[in-house]
Image (tube, rainbow, N blue to C red):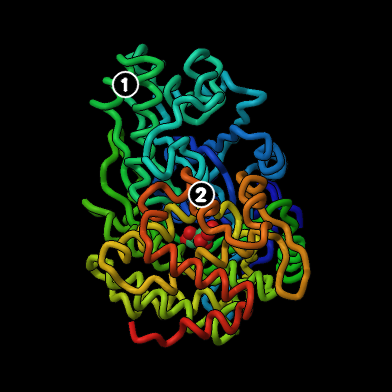
């Protein structure tokens, strides 16, 4: 059964579908970066509200600024922007849901003016973002905005023809300001510490170059809530799509697969209203810091701890790494001994239970979460997911062997060949530069840690870290992954 409005009623009854009238849903949010995560998370939560007959004026209009977005737009457009969310787990506690919260989708490449008009219209009250950790034009080592980036320079000079996310937001806000329309909230949903602050800093830096009056208006009127977002969402594979068709008779061009677990903790700072997401389990708070530090350090950090070692051992999926006793123990020790001692209490959360759940989630054999996905963009992820922990350990003069093994495993992985000699694909915009160093034999420590835009200056200045990194890289090269992991397991500290 092909998924679209017309066929909704005839879909297999075990599949949940909008019980509400989709024609009464109007966009209240423009979401930039409609990837799988957005569809499994914010759109899903909002659809749940609509299922309760709420939030019909908070539908989504998707926005795509990159050429890759064409594919998702065309897949969704032919099914009236409906899609299936296919939860996968070893337990029975999972569902298959057709989500109806997305109502429109605009590609900047072909309809830039319609995008700007929509974003400037009164009905849009939130602009939300999943533009990846590396999408904020921000130098990881200094936190400074990349004002010399050619795309940013373009947008500074051509305000009405923007190509970047900040150029687009600035132009939409300028039109609102000029037309006396209240601004929208800018809500980042990416995995980076203080994601709202980072978005704010980027937009204010951008507008200070382009339009200082607008900058001031934004500073006074626009809010940027920080948020912790969580749901493991693998890349949809051909097998996933086939499985959905075979088991549920739903023909969906681009379904989303994910785990049943979902969490969203957001600061309640919305300058122009928001859906009552608390009615579907979203937690609102004044300070998201303890939750985001916990989630990014424990979940995203551990993902990096397992993914490079796992790939070097020839595994393809996260659950396979959890079946390897050495990696499983290593990940848990990293969580317990390195990340947890640096965390502040997160109200309502027991860290031990949280970590048990993480190990269970990583072990989910049904979702087949690809290591290639988790390994991707390491050069953007390390500064956010691992270095806060690493810097805390350096400061507190703690053992650095586990964390340096994670960094050394990434370095060794970047050569592109696993322990059995098989080659694999690496996704990272800085790959060529990194590989030119990682593929050398001999001592590469100074050169590797010298990538300033990744490591900054504090990390390579720690002699304890440099020594430990050297040791782990040397071990990976000489005794191999398994023995290296074993050598750091069960250390007293
Ligand atoms: C992953 C995340 O990309 C990654 O490295 O750690 O995508 C992770 O699956 C999500 O943050 C889970 O919420």
Classify residue 42 as left or right of residue 10: left
Classify residue 349 as left or right of residue 108: left
Q: How many marks?
A: 2
Quarter of the figure with residue 98: bottom right
* Pair 1/2: label in front: 2
Judge whether residue 44 can be spotted in this image: no
Q: Is residue 27 above or below residue 76?
A: above
Q: Is residue 57 above or below residue 265?
A: above
> At numbered mark 2, what does the secondary structure look like: helix, strand or loop?
helix
Q: Is residue 115 above or below residue 401?
A: above
* Disc 1 crowd, CA 10 A, few/some/many (<14, 14-19, 20+): many
Classify residue 54 as left or right of residue 341: right
Foreground pick, 28 / 379: 379
**Structural distance between the alpha carbons of marks 1 and 2:** 27 Å
Task: Residue at 51%, 82% (x, y): give it.
Answer: 328
Foreground pick, 209 / 271: 209
Quarter of the figure with residue 299: bottom left
> At numbered mark 1, what does the secondary structure look like: helix, strand or loop?
helix
Residue 173 position within the rendered picture, expressed as x and y whole percent measured from the top left:
39, 22
- For label 1, the residue is 215
* Disc 2 crowd, CA 10 A, few/some/many (<14, 14-19, 20+): many
Judge whether residue 387 can be spotted in this image: yes
Residue 35 position within the rendered picture, expressed as x and y whole percent measured from the top left:
58, 48
In which quadrant is the C terminus drawn?
A: bottom left
Tell which residue pokes out farthest to the front in this image: 442
Task: Residue at 51%, 54% (x, y): give it.
Answer: 446
In which quadrant is the N terminus drawn?
A: bottom right
Residue 304 position within the rendered picture, expressed as x and y whole percent measured from the top left:
52, 65
- For label 2, the residue is 380
Residue 279 position within the rendered picture, expressed as x and y whole percent measured from the top left:
33, 57
- Asked if marks 1 and 2 touch (Cβ < 8 Å), the reply is no
């Amino acid at each position: 059964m092909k998924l679209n409005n017309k066929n909704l009623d005839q879909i297999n009854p075990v599949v949940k579908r909008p019980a509400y009238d989709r024609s009464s849903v109007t966009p209240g949010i423009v979401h930039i970066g409609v990837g799988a995560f957005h569809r499994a998370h914010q759109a899903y939560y909002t659809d749940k509200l609509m299922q309760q007959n709420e939030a019909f004026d908070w539908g989504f209009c998707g926005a795509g600024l990159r050429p890759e977005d064409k594919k998702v737009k065309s897949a969704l457009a032919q099914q009236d922007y409906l899609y299936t969310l296919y939860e996968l787990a070893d337990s029975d506690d999972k569902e298959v849901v057709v989500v109806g919260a997305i109502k429109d989708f605009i590609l900047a490449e072909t309809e830039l003016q319609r995008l700007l008009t929509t974003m400037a219209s009164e009905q849009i009250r939130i602009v939300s973002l999943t533009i990846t950790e590396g999408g904020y034009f921000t130098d990881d080592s200094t936190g400074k905005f990349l004002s010399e980036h050619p795309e940013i320079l373009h947008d500074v000079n051509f305000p009405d023809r923007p190509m970047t996310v900040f150029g687009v937001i600035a132009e939409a806000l300028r039109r609102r300001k000029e037309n006396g329309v209240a601004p929208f909230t800018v809500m980042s949903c990416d995995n980076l510490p203080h994601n709202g602050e980072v978005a704010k800093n980027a937009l204010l830096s951008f507008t200070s170059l382009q339009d200082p009056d607008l900058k001031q208006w934004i500073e006074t009127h626009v809010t940027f809530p920080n948020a912790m977002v969580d749901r493991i969402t693998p890349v949809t594979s051909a097998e996933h799509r086939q499985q959905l068709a075979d088991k549920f008779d739903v023909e969906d061009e681009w379904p989303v697969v994910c785990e049943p677990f979902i969490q969203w903790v957001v600061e309640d700072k919305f300058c122009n209203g928001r859906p009552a997401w608390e009615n579907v389990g979203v937690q609102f708070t004044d300070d998201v810091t303890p939750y985001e530090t916990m989630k990014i350090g424990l979940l995203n950090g551990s993902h990096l701890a397992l993914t490079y070692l796992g790939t070097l051992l020839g595994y393809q999926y996260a659950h396979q790494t959890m079946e390897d006793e050495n990696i499983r123990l290593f990940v848990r020790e990293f969580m317990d001994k390195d990340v947890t001692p640096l965390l502040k209490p997160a109200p309502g959360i027991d860290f031990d239970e949280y970590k048990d759940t993480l190990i269970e989630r990583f072990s989910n054999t049904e979702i087949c979460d690809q290591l290639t996905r988790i390994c991707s963009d390491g050069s953007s992820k390390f500064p956010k997911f691992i270095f806060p922990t690493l810097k805390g350990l350096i400061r507190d003069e703690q053992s650095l062997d586990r964390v340096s093994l994670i960094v050394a495993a990434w370095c060794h992985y970047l050569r592109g060949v696993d322990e059995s000699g098989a080659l694999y694909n690496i996704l990272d915009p800085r790959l060529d530069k990194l590989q030119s160093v990682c593929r050398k034999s001999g001592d590469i420590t100074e050169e590797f840690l010298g990538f300033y835009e990744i490591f900054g200056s504090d990390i390579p200045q720690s002699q304890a870290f440099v020594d430990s990194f050297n040791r782990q890289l040397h071990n990976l090269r000489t005794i191999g992954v398994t023995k290296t992991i074993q050598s750091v397991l069960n250390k007293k500290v």
